[in-house]
Image: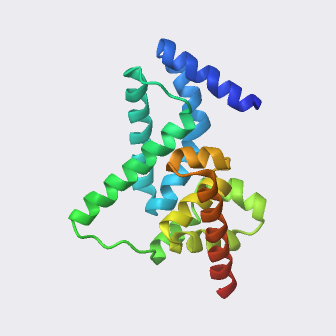
């Protein structure tokens, strides 16, 4: 078990056993940026992503307060994130709003601190990052989610399987297909 996973388990134990707000704050610091990025890729709007991220951590605190068993704090956060995003889409669809990637969202993508700091260093070129983000947003939701969890959030296949409720092989196949489609989309640009 890696040092960070062990640290997370210790913090989770403190949180579950004593409802330690300091442990929760440390877990928040570890996961807030990741959850925000995950949500942003789904909703494409900074304000909505911030609201959902706050809601996810509030729900996580309530869940822990109810003394429910948690195997993985990150798994809980991602599951709550997915549910909040679904709720947002349901609410919007009842208002008959249309979802699309528009020029405003493309500009907003370049402003995300996580992309400018983390991914830009890895890829090296802001324009390329923006192209990848725009292509990711055009991917089928199932592919986008798995690719984002694996390469942006850097989760293991087993963690993605837990979050999505799918098997390891299914995740690998979806990841392969998603990457293939993403490469095709980037090749056309």
Q: Nearer the viewer, residue 45 or 173?
A: 173
Q: Quadrant of residue 186?
A: bottom right
Q: Is residue 97 above or below residue 31?
A: below
Name which residue lies at 78% across and 65% down: 124
Q: Position of residue 136 (x, y in %)?
A: 57, 69
Does residue 20 appear in the picture of this structure? no
Q: Locate the N terminus and report the quarter of the image it occupies.
A: top right
Does residue 25 appear in the picture of this structure? yes
Q: Is residue 16 above or below residue 181?
A: above
Name which residue lies at 52% across and 70% down: 137
Q: Nearer the viewer, residue 153 or 163?
A: 163
Give the farthest residue toward the top.
18
Q: Position of residue 21 (x, y in %)?
A: 49, 20
Q: Position of residue 175 (x, y in %)?
A: 64, 63
Name which residue lies at 53% across and 71% down: 107
Give the farthest residue toward the bottom.
188
């Amino acid at each position: 078990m890696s040092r960070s996973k062990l640290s997370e388990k210790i913090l989770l134990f403190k949180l579950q056993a004593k409802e330690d707000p300091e442990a929760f704050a440390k877990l928040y610091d570890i996961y807030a940026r990741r959850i925000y990025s995950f949500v942003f890729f789904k909703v494409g709007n900074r304000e909505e992503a911030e609201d959902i991220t706050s809601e996810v951590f509030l729900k996580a605190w309530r869940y822990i307060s109810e003394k429910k068993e948690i195997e993985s704090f990150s798994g809980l956060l991602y599951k709550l994130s997915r549910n909040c995003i679904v709720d947002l889409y349901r609410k919007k669809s009842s208002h008959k709003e249309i979802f699309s990637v528009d020029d405003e969202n493309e500009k907003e993508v370049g402003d995300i601190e996580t992309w400018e700091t983390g991914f830009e260093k890895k890829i090296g070129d802001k324009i390329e990052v923006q192209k990848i983000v725009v292509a990711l947003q055009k991917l089928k939701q199932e592919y986008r989610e798995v690719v984002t969890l694996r390469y942006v959030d850097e989760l293991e296949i087993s963690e993605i399987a837990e979050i999505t409720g799918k098997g390891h092989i299914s995740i690998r196949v979806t990841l392969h297909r998603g990457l293939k489609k993403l490469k095709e989309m980037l090749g056309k640009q």
